[in-house]
Image (cartoon, rainbow, N blue to C red):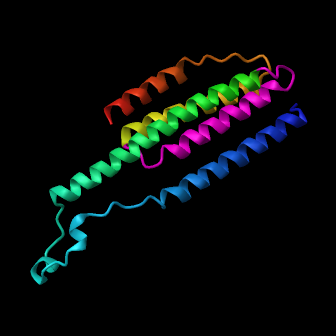
């Protein structure tokens, strides 16, 4: 039999996760498109009838915009991980009987922040941040199940190392 607080916490987590997913979907449509220098010049009539081609300058501009977005995402995600660790430590100090709910909620909130800041990053960083988000949600679930839970964070640490590798390659 579930305790009333558990039911309420599960509902809250579901609502927060749903809102975060909807926000991520909405924000993904707001990603600014890089502009090219060739768009400012008027094309000749022959060029306008030809199929558009990518110039080296536009490819370089697009790559630079992607790299800038990836670098910003890496910085934001690393900041989120550190902030979340501090908040987890604070929530763990609450202790039983209700402290595990605070820890569970913080893991879920941290995973949403990671998801939100990974938007616009390159594929490697996005994949690594999704692994971190999945591990954070697993920890959230583990803490939500038991007040005495002490789940291993090794998978999360491995996912963070994968993110560090992906960020250093960007």
Q: Is residue 3 visible?
A: yes
Along the viewing direction, whichever of 74 and 53 lies nearer the viewer: 74
Relative to 170, residue 159 above or below: above
Magenta part, dominant SS:
helix
Relative image position of residue 163 (x, y in whole percent) = 43, 30
Residue appearing at x 44%, y 43% in the figure: 72
Magenta region, residue range: 93-122
User: Residue 80 at x, y = what percent?
Assistant: 57, 35
31 on left or right of 57? right
Q: Position of residue 166 (x, y in %)?
A: 37, 32
Residue 145, percent from left and from top: 76, 26
**Residue 12 or residue 47, whichever sits in front:** 47
Q: Residue lying farthest left?
A: 46
Q: Does 67 appear in magenta?
A: no
> Is 34 placed left or right of 106 in the picture?
left
Q: Quadrant of the C terminus?
A: top left
How many numbered marks, from 0 up?
Answer: 0
In the figure, 105 relative to 21: above or below? above
Residue depicted at x 24% and y 71%: 39
- Name the outermost residue toward the bottom: 45
* Front residue of this view, candidates 161 and 74: 74
Compared to 24, does 156 lie above or below? above
In the rendered structure, the answer to whether residue 125 lies left or right of residue 152 reads left
Let me know if residue 142 appears in the view.
no
Q: Where, by quadrant of the figure, is residue 148 drawn?
A: top right
Q: Residue at x 16, y 60 (%)?
A: 55
What residue lies at 55% left-to-right and 39% top-to-bottom? Answer: 114
In the rendered image, residue 113 lying in the magenta stretch gets the answer: yes
Q: Quadrant of residue 9?
A: top right
User: Is 109 situated left or right of 119 in this image?
Assistant: right
């Amino acid at each position: 039999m579930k305790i009333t607080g558990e039911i309420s916490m599960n509902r809250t987590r579901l609502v927060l996760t749903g809102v975060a997913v909807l926000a991520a979907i909405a924000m993904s449509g707001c990603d600014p498109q890089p502009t090219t220098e060739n768009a400012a010049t008027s094309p000749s009539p022959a060029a306008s009838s030809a199929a558009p081609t990518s110039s080296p300058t536009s490819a370089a501009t697009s790559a630079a915009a992607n790299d800038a977005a990836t670098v910003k995402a890496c910085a934001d995600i690393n900041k989120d991980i550190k902030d979340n660790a501090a908040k987890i430590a604070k929530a763990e100090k609450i202790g039983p009987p209700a402290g595990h709910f605070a820890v569970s909620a913080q893991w879920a909130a941290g995973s949403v922040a990671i998801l939100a800041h990974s938007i616009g990053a390159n594929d490697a960083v996005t994949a690594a941040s999704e692994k971190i988000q999945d591990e954070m949600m697993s920890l959230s679930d583990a803490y939500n199940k038991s007040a005495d839970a002490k789940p291993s964070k090794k998978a999360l640490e491995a996912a963070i190392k994968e993110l560090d590798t992906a960020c250093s390659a960007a």
